[in-house]
Image (tube, rainbow, N blue to C red):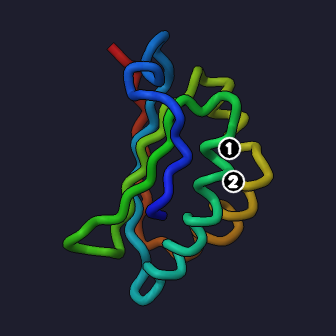
Amino acid sequence: MGQYAIDKTVKDAVEGGGLLVVAQWEAKEGQADRIGDILSRFLPEAQREAGAKLFLISRAKDNPAQFLFYELFRDEAAFKAHQDSAHFKTYIAGEALPLLAKRERTQYALL
């Protein structure tokens, strides 16, 4: 997950507002590296979505079982398209979610 395909500044990404989704995951015991591998395959696909203005995934330094998602979408429709995408259904819904002990998501509107 060390490579990020970002070709715009944060200023460019937030211009015009959007829907910000922040998610926190915690892997089940012994599953963190497996989730990390899944996310490394998922991330480039998510970053290429037309409606994804900014898409970052981080892993906690002090607890590698914890992951933080910072996702900025153009609007609600772009977020829905993200969840309906083949890569979301394959990697997230199909592979990663069953390996989680905890999942939290919050949506924000940019000020």
Q: Which x, y percent locates residue 11?
A: 38, 20
Q: Is residue 26 above or below residue 45?
A: below
Q: Mark 2 or mark 1, which has the lower sequence index? A: 1
Q: Amino acid at mark 2?
A: Phe
**Camera-nearest residue between 101 and 40:** 40
Q: Residue furthest left?
A: 62
State if disc 1 and disc 2 touch (CB < 8 Å).
Answer: yes
Q: Which x, y percent locates residue 29?
A: 39, 86
Q: Is residue 58 above or below residue 5?
A: below
Residue annotated with mark 2: 88
Measuring 44% from the left and 30% from the top, which residue is drawn there? 20
**Is residue 84 shown left or right of residue 19?**
right
Q: Which x, y percent locates residue 71?
A: 48, 39
Q: Mark 2 packing: few (<14 Cα in 10 Å), some, or many (20+)? A: some
Q: Which x, y percent locates residue 55?
A: 50, 42
Residue annotated with mark 1: 83
Q: Amino acid at mark 1?
A: Gln
Q: Quick one: SS at disc 1?
A: helix
